[in-house]
Image: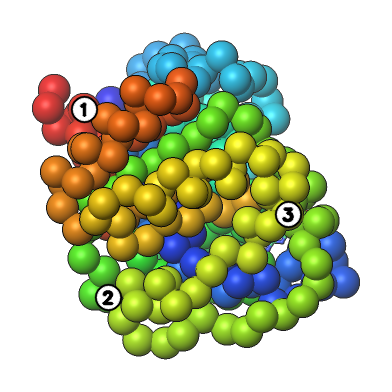
Amino acid sequence: MIVEAAPAKLNLALHVRARRADGYHELETLFAFVADGDVVTIDPTGAPGLTLTGPFAAGLSGEGDNLVLRAERLFRARVVDGRPMAILLDKRLPVASGIGGGSADAAATLRALARLEGVAIDDPRLFGCAEALGSDVPACLLGKTALGRGRGELLLPLDGLAALPALLINPGVAVSTAAVFARWDGIDRGPIGQGDPLAAALAGRNDLEPPALALAPVIAEILALLAAQPGVRLARMSGSGATCFALFDTADQRAAAAARVRAAHPWWCLETVLAGQPGVPCRDQAAA
Ligand code: C5P
């Protein structure tokens, strides 16, 4: 059995700089990862196919267009040929929610197949597959705090982000990434600052918040609630939404904020920690 964590990614800041002729947008974004996420397991002896489990399995199809199966096909076509595998995807993250779910799953599938076939994790062909699968997949393959440029695939790893307590909230409204980008107002508000990643994030913004709020007004309510919690360092939307996160000074402050949110709203609410790395098991696995 090969078990790979697919940690959720956060965009600590996301600056949209320009529309491109190819339909994508030129970005600068601070990618970071948390200690929880989906889990991809490959059973080399099992019958081929994708099995979905977990709280968000119902939101997905196990058909051929699933990013996990697309990642497997691309790996087999470009890296090491072989027969399809039995893959189990434990879907713990909400779908289409701005924290990388499908991209993280595709990246974890590439890492699992690389381990199975003895391919180095930094093999450039893996990054080639990741880039072809989606703008966030290279960052999820790297799985470390990084500055992303281009459409998100040009990555500069960054050191020095502390393991801060984080709270993630999703209202259960799926937001289309393409629809959010299409509503961006076209104004370049400038680059992300250099130096300490948290300081750069605090001085930065997510330019996709206004267009996402226009499509899903509940996001404004979540951001206001998070920003009002004691001990919050940063409250922001991730990616194209609708998931928002808050970073806290202490785990007690995070727990108190989570308790208040849960008491008042039926939203998905995850208490986790910033700066989880791939290869470090998700919490549940570590406990098992
Ligand atoms: O690359 P990916 O397939 O994940 O992107 C989904 C959609 O998000 C794209 O089709 C595009 O509409 C939008 N997008 C964008 N600029 C980016 C990344 C994504 O416009 N840098």
**Which of 154/71 is in front?**
154
- Alpha-carbon span between mark 3 and mark 1: 35 Å
Q: Which mark is residue 250?
A: none
Count of numbered badges drawn on the protein: 3
Give whichever of 17, 218 is nearer the camera. 218
Which residue is pictured at 39% across the width and 41% down the height?
168
Q: Residues within 10 Å of mark 1 (few under 14, many from 20)?
A: few
Q: Is residue 26 left or right of residue 146?
A: right
Residue name at image x 37 percent, y 61 percent: 234
Residue 268: x percent and y percent? 43, 28
Point out which mark residue 211 bears. Answer: 3
The image shows residue 170 at horizontal and vertical percentages of 50, 35
Q: Secondary structure at mark 1?
A: helix
Res. 284 mark = 1
Can I make out residue 112 in this image?
Answer: no
Distance from disc 3 to disc 2, alpha carbons, whole Å, reads: 31 Å
| Residue 235 visible in the picture | yes
User: Residue 31: x, y in percent?
Assistant: 44, 63
Please, what secondary structure does the residue beneath circle 3 have? Answer: helix
Amino acid on which disc 3 is placed = Pro
Between 258 and 98, the one nearer to me in the picture: 258
Q: CA distance from mark 2 to mark 1?
A: 26 Å
Please give the label number shown on residue 159. 2
Residue at screen point 40% across, 25% down: 264
Q: Earlier in the sequence, mark 2 or mark 1?
A: 2
